[in-house]
Image (spheres, rainbow, N blue to C red):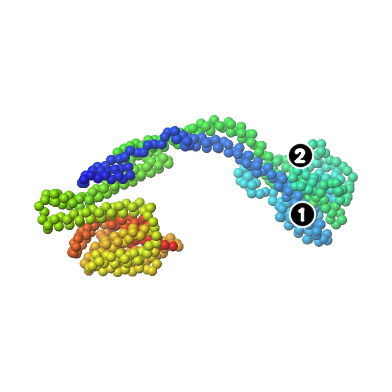
Amino acid sequence: MSWRLKLGAWSFSGRWGAVEGSRHALPPKPPARLSHLRPSLRTNALLMALAMLVLPQLIVVGWSLMERDIGGKLQWETKTSADEAAEAIANTAETDSADMEARLDEIAARRGTRIRVVRDDGATRFDLDADRGTDLVHQIGTLFFGPDGAPTLREFDETLGPVTKRPEVVKVTGWATTLAPPPPPLLEESSHAYPFAIARKPDESSAAPVSTAFRSGPPPPNEPTVVTGCRVSPAGKLLVCHAARAVTLDGRPHVVYAQESSRRAVRALYDLRYHLARLSIVMLPFALVFSWWMGRRMVRPIEWLRERVLEKAKSANPRADIDLSGGDEVRDLAEAFNDLLGALDQRRRANEAFVADLVHEFKNPVAAIRACAESLASGGADEKRAARLAKILSDSSGRLDALVSQFLELARAEAGMPNEARADVDLGALANGVATAASDSFEDVTFVVEADPDTIVVGVAPRLDSLVRNLVDNAASFAGKGGSVRIVVRREPAAAAGSEIVALEISDTGPGIAAEDLPRVFDRFFTTRALARPDIDRPGPKRHGSGLGLALVKAVAEAHGGEVSALGTRAPGEGATFRVTLPART
C-alpha cells in the first residue's frame, strides 16, 4: 500500500514503514525584462547625489516664492493701521488724550506696526511701537542661515530724517520741505486708497531735496488720502513699509505715520542662485563618480550574499553556514538568512518526524486489517473466528478513521480555520454538555462543573466542542476508577486594560504529568496514556492515545486567539490541570 504526502516544497512518498523524500524545484524567476523597471541601489545612489545638487536651487526658488508677497502684505498692514488710527482720532474727543493713546496702542499691537501721530511743525504727539520685526519664517531662516545682522526699525528710521520731510508725507499733506539729505529711494509707492501698487524705481534726480513755501491746513481735494511704500536698508537686510495719512487734531494738521518691518533678506538669498547653479555644474562630475563608487560599494556585498543564498536554494540539504564576514548591515542580513535556513531545517526535520510518526500510527491498524484479509482469504473460518476477525477489522478501521479525522481537524486548526463561520458560543453550557456525554462513557468517574453565567466567546462551535471534549476525555482517562474531573469556566479580566477573557480549567485526580514531560504534552503524537494508569480496568474497548488530542487543543485555542497551558503534579490525589483562555465577547 503506497502513500504520498506533500509539505511545502517537499514531498514524501513510499510504502508503509518506509519513507522517501524529494524536493520540488523552485518556482522560475520573473522575466529579466522586468528587473530594469525596479530601481536598484545604484540608481538610488545616483538619484540621491543629483538631489543633493538640485536641493539648494529648490530651496532658493521656494524661499523666493515665500518672500514674493511680503511687501504687499506689509503695505496692506500699514495702510489698514493708518486708516484705523485716523478713524480712532476722528471718533475720540480731542481733550481725552489718554483714551486716544489707548486706542492707538491697541491698533498697533493688533497689527504689529509702529504708529506715530506727528504735527505739521514736526512735534510727535503719539509714538506707539508694536513692530515685531520678525516672524516664524524669519526665525527658521535664522536657524538655517545664521543671524542676518539686520538693523531694527528704529535704527533704520533714524537714518530717514524727520517724518514731515519725507516724500510720502509731503505728498499726502502738501507740507513744505527744507534742504535735507534725501531718504533712501522708495521701492514701491501707492498714492491711492488701495493697498497694492505697481512697483517702480524712482529716477535718481527725483531724490534731490526741494524747497517750497510752508502751507498749513488740510490737503486740497485732488491730493491722495493715503500714500504707501516700502524701503530696504542699505545692506538689503531689512524691509520697511509705511503708510502716511493726513488728519486734523486740536485744529491743526497732523499726519498718521504707520510702519512695519520684516527682517527677511529679501534679495540676498535669491541673488545666490547663479553662484549655486555654477557650483552645481562644477560638482556634477564629482557627484556622478561618487554615486557610482557608493552604489558599487553597497551592491557588491548584497550580490555576493544573493549568490550564496541561491546556492543554498539549489542544495538538496541546505545548511545555515553562510559566511558572516564583514561588520555592516550585510552581516546582519546574512545572519538573518542563517536563522531562516536553521528554522527551515528544523521544520523539515519536524515534518519528517511527523510523517514517520504518522506512518507508525497507521502501521498497526493497517497491519491488522491486512492480517484479517489474509486470514479470510485462506478460508476455513468458523463463525466464532469470523466474528473475532470482524471485530478486529471494525476496531482497526475505526482507529484509522479516528486518526485521519483528527489529523485533518488538526491541519484545519493549525491553518487558522479561515473559511469556517464563527458565532457566539457559551463555553459554560458547552462544558456542561460535554461533561454529561462523558459521564455515560466513564461511568466510574465523577464530573463536577462550575460555570459563571456570562462565558460567551466568538468562535467555531464544532472546533470548540472538540477542544473541550479532548480535554475532558483526557482527564477522565487519567482519573481512573473512582476518580473525579473538575471543570471550571470563569470570566476574568485580561492583562490588557479594558478587555476580558473566558478561562476554562479542567483538572483530574490522576497521577499528574512528570516535570520532564510538560514541555512536550502538546506535541503531535506524544502520549503517556498507555503507561499512566496500568490499574485501569474498564469494560469495553481499550482506550489508546493517538497523541493528537492535546496538539489539536492547542491549535484550536490559538486559532481563536487564545492560549493553553498545562500544570503537572505528583502530589497524592492531585492530577494534571489544563487551562485554556479565550477572548470574551465584548
Asked where in the image residue 540 lies, by quadrant, the reply is bottom left
Q: Could you give the CA–CA distance between mark 2 and mark 1, rounded to whole angstroms?
A: 27 Å
The label on residue 84 is 1
Q: In this view, does 368 lie to the left or right of 292?
A: left
Q: Can I make out residue 80 in this image?
A: yes
Percent from the top left, x then y, of residue 322? 35, 39
User: Which residue: 89% across, 48% down?
Assistant: 215
Residue occupying the point 76% across, 59% down: 102
Which sits in the foreground, 163 or 529?
Answer: 529
Where is mark 2, residue-wise? 200
Q: How many labels does the image show?
A: 2
Could you say which is closer to the camera, residue 517 or residue 403? Answer: 403
Res. 275 image quadrant: top right
User: Where the N terminus falls, by quadrant?
Assistant: top left
Q: In this orientation, which residue lies closer to the viewer: 229 or 191?
A: 191
Q: In which quarter of the image is the C terminus?
A: bottom left
Q: Residue 481 falls in which quadrant of the image?
A: bottom left
